[in-house]
Image (cartoon, grey):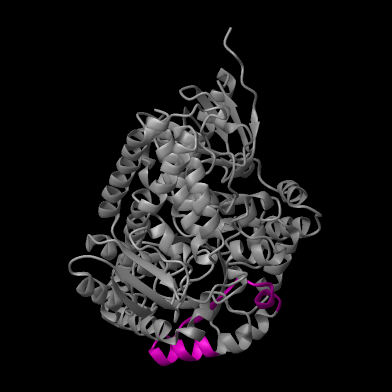
Amino acid sequence: MPELHPLLHGVGVGTGAAVGTAVVLAPAARPPADEPADPGAGPRVREAFEAVAAELRRRAETAGGTTGEVLQATALMAADPGLLAVVDQRLAAGSGPATAVDEAVEQFCAVLAASGPYLAERVTDLRDVRDRVVARVLGLPEPGVPQLTGPSVVVARDLAPADTAALDLSLVVGIVTELGGPTSHTAIIAAQFDIPCVVRAAGALALPAGTDVALDARAGTVTPDPPRAVRAEISARRAARAALAASAGGPGRTADGTAVQLLANVGTLEDADRAAALDVEGVGLFRTEVLFLDRAGAPSLAEQTDAYAWVFTAFGDRKVVVRTLDAGADKPLAFVEVAAEENPALGVRGLRTSRRHPELLTTQLAALAAAAERTGTHPWVMAPMVSTPAEAAQFAAQARAAGLPTVGAMVEVPAAALRARQLVAAGLDFVSIGTNDLTQYAMAADRLEGDLADLLDPWQPAVLQLVQATGTVEVPVGVCGEAARDPLLALVLVGLGVRSLSMAAAAVPAVRFALSRTDLGTCVEMAGAALAADSPQDARRAAARSADADVLAL
Amino acid sequence: MSTRTATVASRVGLHARPASLFVQAAAATGLPVTVAVGEGVPVDARSILMVMGLGAKHGDQVTLTAEGEGADAALDSLVELVETDHDA
């Protein structure tokens, strides 16, 4: 009789479901507690360090850009004479080989941690070197991503960007993590590629690699060795989803004909090409910072113009909403080093970057205007992290002066949501609500803090109330954030006055279907019920009471 | 033994990319080069961990020393590196 593994519970990202083979990313090997001394292990340990350094150098060359520089610096750490000297001392003092590596690394981590905030990230890199060296010294597999051979459910403590870069996403049908949160890197990747995902699933790493697991993001559950009934249900759901995606098309409309634009979020030029080939009404959020993130200097006017013209051309007559540079906090730029901030999320970020580096925004607006002229298109342009009417007025004036007539602002902070009317009066043509940041600021919960996943739920009634405050303005109100891709929540947002929804392009068909089955009155009713609730769970349940059965089955 | 002083020009100090460039250049000299902040204890300039651990900030004075053939020229080029703003 095979051992039965219990059902795991976590936080679902999206509403999909899948069955696949569990592929567990090896967790870091730790030195055995009672590792015997081995004073002669010096050469073997050095060899392990050198092998890790060589591999990092190789990856640095392949990666290039800022990532390449970080990997290059990490390679230097793996070959560091100071570190190797301390390892030798520890070996001579009677520590076992893996233990000596661990002790030497921790000694340097303590020094680095004491040397200021810039070095905090280097501590992470140094521990990554340690994990690789320790694994080699112990003859265990290095932590990281194994080769996938078939439809796989990737199981990890949390996915680092480096892990995702190494994954063959075409074979990943689901992702399960023990840590992370609904707005973590893992969740964003999952949304981008429409991969069902369950985060914060305690005990996931104990899933035996190679067994089948069923993952249900809507229920937030992971079932090892799924019984036939569960497999059949998931397979039926996937078929239904695929069928509705194929059946419905065209502009978004409620059952009684209210237009709700369905737009795509795009970052890279490849994203734009992918999304342009799909049935979407345009781009609701073009995240331009991707052009800036992975490099040592700001892109030139000509380079930016070419990139923007590429995206405008890809979408032709369709709407494209461009967000100007959103840097800072979780998106630091190598070439705009700001002073160390106690609370970067509350610091110089978004539009505020232009207080210190006005030339970045001036150049970007000029490039957008040039690209618009070259392509004969009319992009909408909006600024991130606007907090006051004065900021809105200044940005609007600047954009118009550059030759961009349609100007808006992201509503991401409660101040902007509560004063949306005044923001618009300052000269805006539209506003777009960024639900991830708005939730973070409304709930005072860092969006990268997985332990606070319950607070970061966009169904939080307080967040919905801020959306409602914004939804009453006289100009177009959109939502570009993960909230828009949840079909049920999308209906609530429409009920609160939102008339365009921008999301990962893959999520559009389900939202289109939900709209087509629901009239505006019902959306308003659902919104009212959600606002009256006391918790995100209650809000969802309350909204679901008025929903069409086929919508609930998505 | 040759000695030079230099003022750290990079806005982030001798961290991150500037530290990485400095350490690679120090190792490339093939000489035992040390670096200290002000009158502090000198550390091996070929060790990125030791160099970052110095916590040298923008505007700090660092002292470089080296011994052996070509030490003067090697130190001159390292001084130039430290006094260049690599974030600009």
Residue A493 placement, left or right of A272? right
Above or below residue A174? Residue A497 is: below
- In this view, the residue in front, A319 or A354, is A354
The stretch of residues the image draws in magenta is A394-418
Q: Position of residue A196 (x, y in %)?
A: 52, 41
Q: Position of residue A205 (x, y in %)?
A: 55, 32
Residue ranking furthest to the front: B1
Q: Is residue A534 magenta?
A: no
Q: Position of residue A484 (x, y in %)?
A: 57, 57
Residue A444 placement, left or right of A326? right
Query: In the picture, residue A461 is in which quadrant?
Result: bottom right
Residue depicted at x 63% and y 62%: A494
Residue ranking furthest to the left: B69
Residue A218 placement, left or right of A330? right
Residue A424 visible here: yes
Q: Quadrant of the C terminus of chain B?
A: bottom left
Residue A25 visible here: no
Q: Quadrant of the N terminus of chain B?
A: bottom left
Query: In the picture, residue A321 is in which quadrant?
Result: bottom left
In the rendered picture of this protein, how many numbered marks are placed on residues?
A: 0
